[in-house]
Structure formats: C-alpha cells, structure tokens
Amino acid sequence: MIVCVCNGLSERDVRSVAGPTTAVGDVYRQLGCRVMCGKCVPHVAELLQAVRTPALIGPAATEPDVARTRRRRVAA
Ligand code: FES
C-alpha cells in the first residue's frame, strides 16, 4: 500500500527502515526523499509506533474475538 504519494513510498518501504529509535524524519532521509505535502506523516508515525510496540497490535486485532467469546459465555 502506498503511504506517501508525493515520494511513492509504500508501507513496506517505511517498515524496511523502521527501527525502535527511528524518527519520522529519519524514514524520509533513509529512503532518499523528504516530506513534501506532509499528508503521510501521521501514517508514517503510526507505522513507526507499530514497529516499536508490536505487542499492542495483538490485543487490538483480537478484540472482536474477545467480545464474541464473552457473548457466548453470557448466552451459555
Ligand atoms: S504524501 Fe508524503 S509528502 Fe505528500
């Protein structure tokens, strides 16, 4: 998925340079470009946050399963 239209950066590009201490500006520098319109900056920041805290992705992704399980328990 394209994250930055101005520079043609994909989510994979961003993840390829993302590390635990990578700042948003570092992403563009390491990929040889710079922020132009800035619309992609929040999404790049989210991707970096996901790389820094991968454990947070799990519970959020499974939340609907938890809700379904709770409903089943109540119904039983
Ligand atoms: S979409 Fe990334 S700088 Fe414009």
Image (cartoon, grey):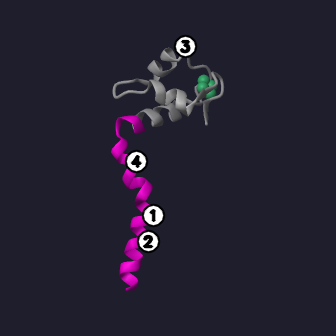
Distance from the alpha carbon under mark 1 to that under mark 4: 13 Å
Displayed quadrant of residue 48: top left
Ligand 1 resides in the quarter of the picture at top right
Q: Are there few (<14), some (14-19), or many (20+) residues within 10 Å of tag 2?
A: few
Q: Earlier in the sequence, mark 1 or mark 4?
A: 4
Residue visible at 61% across and 37% down in the picture: 1
Q: Amino acid at mark 3?
A: Gly
Per the image, label 2 sits on a secondary structure element best described as helix
Residue designated by label 2: 68
Question: For residue 57, which numbered disc appears in the image?
Answer: 4
In the rendered structure, which segment of residues is drawn in magenta?
50-76
In the rendered structure, find residue 1 and report the number of the disc placed on it: none
Q: Which residue is mark 3?
A: 32
> Percent x, y for residue 53?
35, 40
User: Label 3: how many residues lie within 10 Å, few (<14), some (14-19) or many (20+)?
Assistant: few
Q: Are marks 1 and 3 in contact (CB under 8 Å)?
A: no
Q: Three-letter amino acid code at disc 2?
A: Arg
- Residue under the image location 34 percent in, 46 percent down: 55
- The numbered mark, 1 or 3, whose residue comes first in the sequence reads 3
Relative to residue 37, is residue 48 depicted above or below? Answer: below
Q: Residue at coordinates 39% horizontally, 24% vertically from top-left?
A: 22
Q: For the residues labelled 1 and 2, say whether their Cβ atoms are less than 8 Å apart.
A: yes
Which quadrant holds the C terminus? bottom left
Q: Is mark 1 within 8 Å of ligand 1?
A: no
Q: Which residue is mark 1?
A: 64
Distance between the alpha carbons at the discs numbered 1 and 3: 40 Å
Secondary structure found at label 3 = loop
Pick whichever of labels 4 and 2 is earlier in the sequence. Answer: 4
Measure the C-alpha gap from mark 3 to mark 4: 29 Å
Rounded to the nearest angstrom, the CA distance separating label 1 from label 2 is 6 Å
